[in-house]
Amino acid sequence: MNRILETKEPLVIGHRGACAFAPENTIPSYKLAIEQKADLVELDYYLSSDKVPFCIHDKTYDRTTDANQRWSEKKTKISDKDWADIAGLDAGSWFDAKFAGVKLPKLDEAIEAIQDGSVTLIEHKEGDADSLVKLLKDREWTDKLVVQSFNWDFVARCRELEPTLAIAALGSDELTAERIKPIVDKVDVIAWNAKFVDRAAAEMVHKHGKKLFVYTVNDPKRAKELVELGVDGIITDRPGEIGEAIRK
């Protein structure tokens, strides 16, 4: 298991970088999360139509790029465009003019930038486990980062392909032993919506010998409460502030 998961201290995880301060899922956002001392930096990835893995969160390009203007179309599905088209998009101006011209990074570029000063938490949105694990093996990253998904078949397949890979199962709704039963033996971390986490849930996850991460927490007071309940990692848009709150 990845060494970062063996630490006893609560972990601060930058959500899509430090996305309260820079355009999400871009290199500037990831680097800012590192500057803010995030223990891990989370990213999301999809595949282009020509199977290039790259970083974006939504199912369409509208919210976080200039795709509407550039392509004169709305709600373009992520997989409808090839990388040559996607690479030209401006993924910074929507957030602030000072980020004009910032591009969507390829997955390997993003991981490289994050691993330079932190640990990547890869959130799978679309794509097959085999090609992700191959990429991680080729770059010797399998024991140096964490992979998570709401798609539990995907994370189970990742574990099957590469037992050394640290794996997290994402979920929402009530956090019960019954709910996580199908996946708990195949992962290292349960990563859950903070709204559904209480002390009993944290104890239940720990009883299974797993870490518990929660998302997305931007209130320092709430973050402290969650750590006191036994949560092991806080996913936040504001890693600097949350880090200060929970590391005191």
Image (cartoon, grey):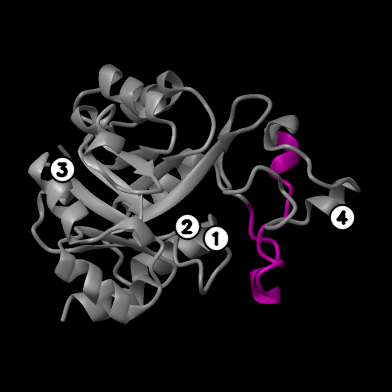
Mark 4 Cα-neighbour bin, 10 Å: few <14, some 14–19, many ≥20: few
Q: Which mark is residue 210?
A: 3
Find disc 1 in the rendering and name its residue. 24
Q: Assess whether residue 92 is covered by the magenta stretch.
A: yes
Magenta stretch, residue numbers? 84-103
Sequence-earlier tag: 2 or 1: 2
Find disc 4 in the rendering and name its residue. 69
Find disc 2 in the rendering and name its residue. 16
Location of the N terminus by quadrant is top left
Q: Secondary structure at mark 4?
A: helix
Q: Mark 4: which amino acid?
A: Gln
Between 55 and 173, the one lying in front of the other is 173
Residue 10 vs 125, above or below: the answer is below
- The structure residue drawn at horizontal position 64% and vertical position 69%, both measured from the top left corner, is 99
Mark 2–mark 1 CB contact (< 8 Å): yes
Location of the C terminus by quadrant is bottom left
